[in-house]
Image (tube, rainbow, N blue to C red):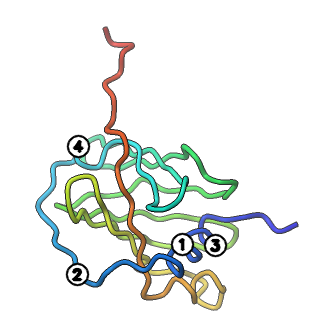
Amino acid sequence: MAVKTLALFLVTYLLLHPAGDSVFAQQSDPEDWSGIWEAEGTLFRISVSVTDDVLTVGEVESLGFLWSAEPGRIEGDQMTLQVQTQGVTAELLAELTAEGTAVVKALSCVPDYMVACALAKDRQAIFVRIEPEQPDASGL
């Protein structure tokens, strides 16, 4: 049985839910990124936290996809993040388009002969922040 991967999920999602070409971004505060994000139309969820403009992404509901992510970088209303899954490495670009909404696309995907990379080319996904980051209650 083949192991499901984040890349295959992203490819499937991008094929079935292409976003519009127009992106209206604004300058963001790093806290605009923090919270729980969901891929629109799915239950795939990630947690995002920001410390000193370094973005950390974690699994909330992966739908069985196995993946890992390096810490990301924030520059204005954009962030970049490297994700690895089952022999594929992709650099993702996310751009805030409105409060609580981001468009995500692959800037690069290697090896490019992998089906996941070929199918993800020129596609994008919409993520919606469903829950802002909650303050840590342990500090009270």
Tag 1 near tag 4, CB within 8 Å = no
What percent of the width, then of the height, locates residue 70?
48, 56
**Residue at x 29% of width, y 59% of height:** 101
Q: Which residue is mark 2?
A: 22
Among numbered discs 3 and 1, the one appearing first in the sequence:
3
What residue is disc 4 on? 31
Hey, what amino acid is under mark 2? Ser
- Outermost residue, top side: 140
Q: Estimate the spatial distance between the alpha carbons at disc 4 and disc 3, rounded to whole Å.
A: 29 Å
Could you tell me the amino acid type at mark 1?
Answer: Tyr
Q: Please name which of the two marks, 3 or 1, marks the residue nearer to the observer.
A: 1
Upstream in sequence: badge 4 or badge 2: 2
User: Which comes before the other along the chain, label 4 or label 3?
Assistant: 3
Tell me if 96 is positioned left or right of 131 in this view. Answer: left
Determine whether the residue tagged by mark 4 lies in a helix, strand or loop.
Answer: helix
Query: Residue 104 versus residue 90: which sits nearer the camera?
Result: 104
**Residue 123: image x %, image y %?**
44, 83
Q: Is residue 2 left or right of residue 65?
A: right
Could you classify mark 2 by the number of other residues whose Cα lies within 10 Å: few (under 14), some (14-19), or many (20 or more)?
A: few
**Which numbered marker is on residue 8?**
3
- Mark 1 sits on what residue? 13
Residue 118 in which image quadrant: bottom right
Q: SS class of the residue under badge 1?
A: helix
